[in-house]
Amino acid sequence: MKDPSLLSICGFLGLSYVVWIILKVFGRFVQWYTSPLNQIPGPKSNKSFWLGSFRDVSHEPFMQPHKRWWMEAGVDVPLVHYTGVLGKSSLLVLDKSIVRTMLTAPAGKVNTRFKKPLFVFLSNTIGNGLVTLEGEDWQRHRRILQPAFKTGFLRERLNTVVPSSISRFLKSWQVAAESGREIDASSHISALTLDIVGEVAFSHNFKGLNAVEEWATKTSSESESLASLDDAFMSSLNRALKLNLMTILCSTLKWIYVDRFLNSSVRRARHAINKATDQIIANAELEGTNDPKSLLHLMLVATDPEQQKGSQERNALSKMEIRDEIKTFVMAGHETTSSWIYLALYAMAIHPDVQDRLYEEICKHSSADSDIFLEQVEKMEYFNLMSFAQNAGSTLQRKTAIAAVLHLYHFLQDYGIALAKTLPPLKLS
């Protein structure tokens, strides 16, 4: 026979836990209902406390809902506010001065000015890279990786990869222009950027341009959207970034280890993306590091330039750390670079005077039948004023975006493809 006192204790603890959860949810409701963040523009789904924008974020492609909310709020708004499960608030920061302040704030060894609690859950999938690390660990990774981005190697690889990629890309756009089709410029530029970043950073073909070329061969009645990429890494990354209710609840209640070890979808996604990333590293090792073809080759041999003699810290990144940095780099660097290219083209579309002046400068420093190299870009004073004012990303992001924008615009003019004064989609005429 069970001890009545034990049953009473268990019942009391269970009831106390239920009451605690009810009080916690009620507290979140009051915080959500009275939050001053509700004055910031955002989606209509913010009016739902229980789910917020969860459906949109979990069912649509990565960052697509955020782009739509931004367009609905107006391209000049500095912030967009949206909510998740149980009224959890998030801010989409769109003002470059605010972003600059956040990115350049001191990263102390103990206290950091802008902490990254949400990214703790992101680490369940992408691991511990520069986006999720804090303090000393972040500083160590940054010291080891930074020299690779300051070499002439990056310039040489971009000069090789960008022109050929743009040429392939715009042949598909030319086919679309001739048939009068509309293009979802955001997804196409995202595919282009992914291939450029993949070749330069990892010597890996993500097959983004393959998807664009396949789209160009179809008629408008068949499909207006790109097919899913035939790449194990991107397929697993997209699955990993797809939110599910358990992850949202664990994030809201700060149960990181519950989500990491008991959420089967997170475990499967983490295993798949790690396997795909390990294959990218293995391919780079087979190519060897004596004649590096990507930043990954440099990362494999990078060491800490400031490590003190006798220090117990590792002088280089482990294979696991490199794996996490690859996942981090694609997740954090690809879409930001793509968005900058997209918005630069949009800015030129709505400002014809800027567009004309830029084209004159391009013609001044290059000929119609030649590629544009970064050495020529550095001489374009007007373009650099525009590009550096808008782009605050890493060296690879900035140089990739600048080179791609110039080549895109140059060839668009040559093909007679006009930039429409709309954002999504881009109308070719």
Image (cartoon, helix red, strand yellow):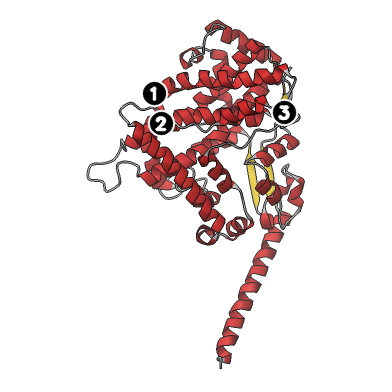
> In the image, is residue 122 above or below residue 86?
above
Return the residue at label 1: 153
62 relative position to 133: left or right? right
> In the image, is residue 344 above or below residue 321?
above
Residue 15: where, in percent of width, then height? 64, 78
Q: Are marks 1 and 2 in contact (CB under 8 Å)?
A: yes
Q: Give neighbour class at mark 1: few <14, some 14-19, many 20+ (Cα, 10 Å).
A: some
- Which image quadrant is residue 63 in? top right
Instruction: Evaluate whether residue 123 shows in this view.
Output: no
Q: CA distance from mark 3 to mark 2?
A: 33 Å
Answer with mark 3 or mark 1, whichever residue precedes in sequence: 1
Q: Amino acid at mark 3?
A: Pro
Residue 298: where, in percent of width, then height? 36, 32
Q: Are marks 3 and 2 in contact (CB under 8 Å)?
A: no
> In the image, is residue 329 above or below residue 425?
below
SS at mark 3? loop
Return the residue at label 3: 425
Asked whether 338 or 46 is in front, the reply is 338
SS at mark 2? helix
